[in-house]
Amino acid sequence: MATAERTSDTIVGRDAELRAVGAFLDAIREGPSSLVFEGDPGIGKTRLWRAAIEAADERGYRVLTSRPAETESGLPFAGLGDLLDPILEEFGPLLPEPQRDSLEIALLRQGVEVSRQDQRILSVAVQGTLRALADSGPTVLAVDDLQWLDGPSARVLGFALRRLDHRPLALVTAVRAGDSAYAALDVESVFPEGKTHRLTLGSLSVDHLDALIRAKVGRGFSLPTLTRIHGASAGNPFFALEIARLLAEEKAAPRASAPLPVPPTLRDLELARMRSLPRDARDALIVVAAAWRPTERLVSAALGKDASKALAAAIEAALLESSEDTLRFTHPLLSSVVLSTTPPARLRRIHARLAELVDDREERVRHLSLSTEEPDARIASALEEAAARARARGAPDSAAELSELAVRLTPTDSAAAVRRRMIQAADYLFEAGDAGRAGGTLEDVLAASPPGPLKADALRRLGWIRYQEQSYSVAVDLFQEALMDTGEDLALRARIRRDLAWAGLMSGDLERASANARAALDVTEGLGDPAALAEATSVGLAEAMLGRGMRQDLMSRAASLEERARGLGIETQPSASFGLVLKWVDDLHAARSGLEELYRRTTERGDEGSLPLVLLHLSELECRAGNWDVAARYAEEGHAAALRTGQEPVRAGFRYTQALVDAHRGNVDRARALAEEGMALAHRTGASLFVIHNLSVLGFIELSLENPAGAHRYLGPLAELVLSGRLREPVLARFLPDEIEALALIGDIERAHALLRHLTERGKALDRVWALATAARCRGLLAGTEGDLLGAIAALEDALAQHERVPYPFARGRTLLVLGEVQRRAKQKRAARESLGRALEIFEGLGATLWAERTRGELGRVGGRATGPGGLTPTERRVAELVAEGRTTREVAETLFLSPRTVDSNLSRIYHKLGVRSRTELAVKIAAERAAQPG
Ligand SMILES: Nc1ncnc2c1ncn2[C@@H]1O[C@H](COP(=O)(O)OP(=O)(O)OP(=O)(O)O)[C@@H](O)[C@H]1O
Ligand SMILES: [Mg+2]
């Protein structure tokens, strides 16, 4: 096309800028970077942007371009389509199928299935595509007028550009000065620090304007005229060219004394230029400005007559250009002038006409919405539908915009429709990551809603927002309130029961959770909706785990429904529940492969919101399995994802698994800090289970430091929950063996036995290997404390046999350690050395520093040198020392945070072990031992 050549032929007065462009392009292999041309409208950004594209071409780089127009900013993925359409054939096949599908659906290469819900997968698909592109060679994404890039494109591109690692890909873009803050893509934040180069363009000199005008208008002006053009345009090439064109039409050169016939504003300037066009051409310009993809055919149809002559005149006047059938203004400023000077009513009529003519559904709906200011039921429902489609394409942001428009155009007498559309808007907003506005919209709905199912629905949605962002217990309250308003809507009731079940589980109100899960399951069975059934089933499963054993029947049924439950949130998907359940029943191998599969699927879908939950289970699993590096990595990744997606309560869970790993490794300070933070977070967000877990770690840390009294202070209250029957699932009470050990060491044997009975009973009832193994260890420990060494050894050997059934190396190491201690006291030196040697090997292999150290100490004692004084436990030792110093029972109790009764029972064991009968004899004995010890 002639005009295109004419604009690309010359470039004047930008030598320094062109050199900067060259240097930028030469450095492209160093990794992701961006070049931003900035400046006033018409200053020459696009001209340089084109020059940059040519320079990239010359270097053999691949260049993908998009030139969004002001009107396009409402069409989702218009920009992404410009960029990727040309390479989709080549690079699409490299993507995993679900990603390829999502990309094709977003770009309308494939039909849109409205039930589709995954939206982040598209970002992952674009990331994969850009990476593959850059891997194939240096690549430039060239986007003009960044301020008009549509939001959905900006979002997915931003996601992808942030994750290029060191690949050679550059963004070259232009943005109007002052508009860059409005651009949906925040370039600075997307590229690494220091990798965004801004070039601000200033005005051109008189000489350069002269060259420019000669080249573009095809004639020169005298120096005085040129100087006046330069003054009037302030050196802005666009203004200067427009003035020159106007003057050129005047034929005779303006007299030096006469004022330059230049209208004061751009708008007037353009109007003057357009006024010289035939009327038909002016009408055609309005249609071109209003349409998304104007063609000669469309303009003719809209005007109801052949527009070819009119359009040719506009092209001749350098107002329009045409390429591949599509018309566009030679400059976006022209179209804004046309739109802003056309009477609104006339513009609305043109939009109405265009709505009848265009094929594309999205365009049609947008024309419709621009064709009226009055509420219109038909248009509102078309917008509602378009919103659903936009979301299905992966553009919840556009969907939200469209449904807000639908709300505005819904006739006020259809209050229910208004509220329904507001709820939809809230949903889209939440999905688009704007939880604040989503919550606000729902609160507006609630304020305006009479009691009834619609209100219930709004309440439960608000509940899920609060669940994610704020607090499980707040969510429970909202769900509870919602339940009151369901009326006869059974499906909704079931859904809310399910919500309650899940939130109840997480907030630790297990009884209520289970009652709700069962109720949900009953109702859903009756309704026969497979996806809902799968969801209810999985919650039912979790419920069944609340100390009532596993429901094999439910598990296999849920598994068969997994395929149809794909659209559900991860936490309620059957396979997530499986992973959890399998972990509970100690089938680590199956649990791991299930969770890893889920992890893979979640990442592939780009479902960042679901990542934390999967990773939480995985990190806990790997910690128990002794893969502490892996566990730490999962925990860190999960915590980061929880932060990114604003999931506060779950963060408490990650603080727990992180603390757990550190505690096992003996990084005491860090573990403590993490667990304390986790506990505070869990309290704040009503996540009772995470309170329990974090407290458990704090107790475990103290036990590892051989401070049983300290451990008991954390674990005692938790044990209370167990004894009162509120925590019946042994897996949720992993602290039990630690508390039993702490109690044994501080001498509260009675309570230790009570807890042991519980652990044994639950372990047997549910056939939990972990519970049985640790219970046997505790039995051995207690027997040993009570002096029944042979009974102790038998129990510990039983424990080891149980350990054979599950790979929990650390737990096994601890059992071996206890066994070694008892064997030593039973004078079975060789056996003791062997047990302790195996324990040490495990602890050292794992990197459990504190436990390894303790084991080495024990080994030293077996070695025949100073055996511990009568085999006293650390607590007994401390009690003995304090008593020997002459402290009273009460003083000892206070010093060691023990009860006086406990001190007394310690004392009687000490007497027994040391063969003394009074405090005085004890003092003498301890003094003698001290004297015997070197140092
Ligand atoms: N240095 C130059 N050499 C030759 N022509 C130029 C130069 N700078 C600008 N032009 C011409 O001036 C006109 C306006 O420039 P351009 O379209 O690049 O402005 P812009 O900064 O992109 O404006 P906007 O912000 O409105 O997009 C165009 O016709 C362009 O070809
Ligand atoms: Mg431009």
Image (spheres, helix red, strand yellow):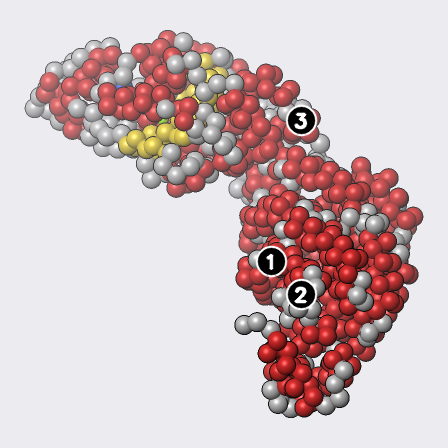
Please state if 759 lies on the left or on the right of 18 as rendered.
Answer: right
Write the residue at 55% across / 59% down. 670
The residues bearing labels 2 and 3 have C-alpha atoms spaced at a distance of 65 Å
Write the residue at 22% across / 28% down. 203
Q: Earlier in the sequence, mark 1 or mark 3?
A: 3
Between 785 and 741, the residue placed more toward the observer is 785
Q: Earlier in the sequence, mark 2 or mark 3?
A: 3
- On-image quarter of the C terminus: bottom right
Choose top left, top right, bottom left or bottom right for residue 728: bottom right
Question: Amino acid under label 1?
Answer: Gly
Q: Which of label 2 and label 1 is nearer to you?
A: 2
Instruction: Assign a secondary structure to mark 3.
Output: loop
Q: Is residue 512 above or below residue 226?
A: below
Q: Are the residues tagged 2 and 1 within 8 Å (C-beta)? A: no
The residues bearing labels 1 and 3 have C-alpha atoms spaced at a distance of 42 Å
Question: Amino acid under label 3?
Answer: Pro
Q: Are the residues tagged 2 and 3 within 8 Å (C-beta)? A: no
Residue 368 location (% of width, % of height): 57, 34
Choose top left, top right, bottom left or bottom right for residue 556: top right
- On-image quarter of the N terminus: top left
Between 892 and 377, the residue placed more toward the observer is 892
Q: Report the residue that reaches farthest toward the top.
A: 2
Residue 615 location (% of width, % of height): 66, 47
Write the residue at 74% across / 57% down. 833
The residue where tag 1 is placed is 666
Residue 455 in view (yes/no): no
The residue where tag 3 is placed is 96
The residue where tag 2 is placed is 865
Residue 234 location (% of width, % of height): 20, 30
Question: Amino acid under label 2?
Answer: Arg
Please state if 822 lies on the left or on the right of 791 as rendered.
Answer: left
